[in-house]
Image (spheres, rainbow, N blue to C red):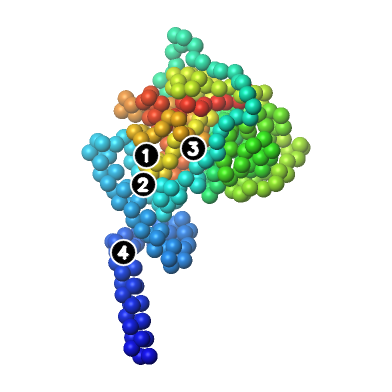
């Protein structure tokens, strides 16, 4: 019996040593600080796995930023709230919903007028069109945030009032027209629902990051729209015309890359991006140039700690990188 107990104690000691030796001790302090800042809690087994994933992401960040310093990349990456996720796990924050439209819906199309000179730079944020960066949490509801963002801008343009609109209202109430709340949705469906039913404010219908029953009260409706306008597919010129003349535009992108998950600053360009397989809906609020390289100013919905205070500068006029001009729309108000 004593021998068995001794062997058991030795095995426990060995396993503990192996477990601790799996990790880089130099990163211990950074790991504990990161967990504390993001309020991460794990059981022992999951904690070991998350530490392993986190260290792999740290190594990726160090390598990428070293290459950036040598001129290989136009953007930097950094540790954020997604640091303990694999790229596959990160997909839970993206929109896996098929955006096939109900029936054969037709919409007006906005195209750039010929020989019209657009401004070299546009940014609707300081002009009052854009609400503060929001956070969708652990819920695939980016489509709802892109929808409210584009409508908030157009309501401000018409009324001069910036009203934060309710994503939760769209998640709960547009399931009737085919959207799936935290499991994805499509902005055009949402906008057409708003055309018929209006939308509540964030204040009257706050966000919970989980699916619920529709509790809309007609007395709380604060905005509506008359229809949807599409931007010609794959045309960054037409998208620029829309951003410059209309305001913030709802766009879809391919975001399922570790480079995007950990984006920090600079002009995001991902050669592996698809312009067809789009999985994230965001808001184009302007465009500009940096070192003579053009970029789109894009508002995300992952909180202000992600990226450049919640925003990403995405490569512009680079063959529709990440599909930013593939599926762009805005509402008529």
The quadrant of the rendering that contains the N terminus is bottom left
Q: Residue furthest bottom?
A: 2
Residue 289 percent location from the top left of the image? 37, 26
Mark 1 secondary-structure assignment: strand
Residue 22: mark in rendering: 4
At x 50%, y 42%, the residue is 94
Residue 258 position by quadrant = top left
* Camera-nearest label, 2 or 3: 3
**Left/right of residue 242 with respect to residue 268 in the rendered view:** right
264 relative to 26 in the view: left or right: right
Q: Farthest residue in the top direction?
A: 115
User: Which residue, given by chain and number where applicable, does mark 2 sit on?
Assistant: 78
Residue 26 appearing in the image: yes
Q: Distance from label 2 to label 1 (Cα)?
A: 9 Å
Question: What residue is shown with label 1?
Answer: 265
Judge depth for marks 1 and 3 and give the one in front.
3
Disc 2 + disc 3, Cβ < 8 Å: no
């Amino acid at each position: 019996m004593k021998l068995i107990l001794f062997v058991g104690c030795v095995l426990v000691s060995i396993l503990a040593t192996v477990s601790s030796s799996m990790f880089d001790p130099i990163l211990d302090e950074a790991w504990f600080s990161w967990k504390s800042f993001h309020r991460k809690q794990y059981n022992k087994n999951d904690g070991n796995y998350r530490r392993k994933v986190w260290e792999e992401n740290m190594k990726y960040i160090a390598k990428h930023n070293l290459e950036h310093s040598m001129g290989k990349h136009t953007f930097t990456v950094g540790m954020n709230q997604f640091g303990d996720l694999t790229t596959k796990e990160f997909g839970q924050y993206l929109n896996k919903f098929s955006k096939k439209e109900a029936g054969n819906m037709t919409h007006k199309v906005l195209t750039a007028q010929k020989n019209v000179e657009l401004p070299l730079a546009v940014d609707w944020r300081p002009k009052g069109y854009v609400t503060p960066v929001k956070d969708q949490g652990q819920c695939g509801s980016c489509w709802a945030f892109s929808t409210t963002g584009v409508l908030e801008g157009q309501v401000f343009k018409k009324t001069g009032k910036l009203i934060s609109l309710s994503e939760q209202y769209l998640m709960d109430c547009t399931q009737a027209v085919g959207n799936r709340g935290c499991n994805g949705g499509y902005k055009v469906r949402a906008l057409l629902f708003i055309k018929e039913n209006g939308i509540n404010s964030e204040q009257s219908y706050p966000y919970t990051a989980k699916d619920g029953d529709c509790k809309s009260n007609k007395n709380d409706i604060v905005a509506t729209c008359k229809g949807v306008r599409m931007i010609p597919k794959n045309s960054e010129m037409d998208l620029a015309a829309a951003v410059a003349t209309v305001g913030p535009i709802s766009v879809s992108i391919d975001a399922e890359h570790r480079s995007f998950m950990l984006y920090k600053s600079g002009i995001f360009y991902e050669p592996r991006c698809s312009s067809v397989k789009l999985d994230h809906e965001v808001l184009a609020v302007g465009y500009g140039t940096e070192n003579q390289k053009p970029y789109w100013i894009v508002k995300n919905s992952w909180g202000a700690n992600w990226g450049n205070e919640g925003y990403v500068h995405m490569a512009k006029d680079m063959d529709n990188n990440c599909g930013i001009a593939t599926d762009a729309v805005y509402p008529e108000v």
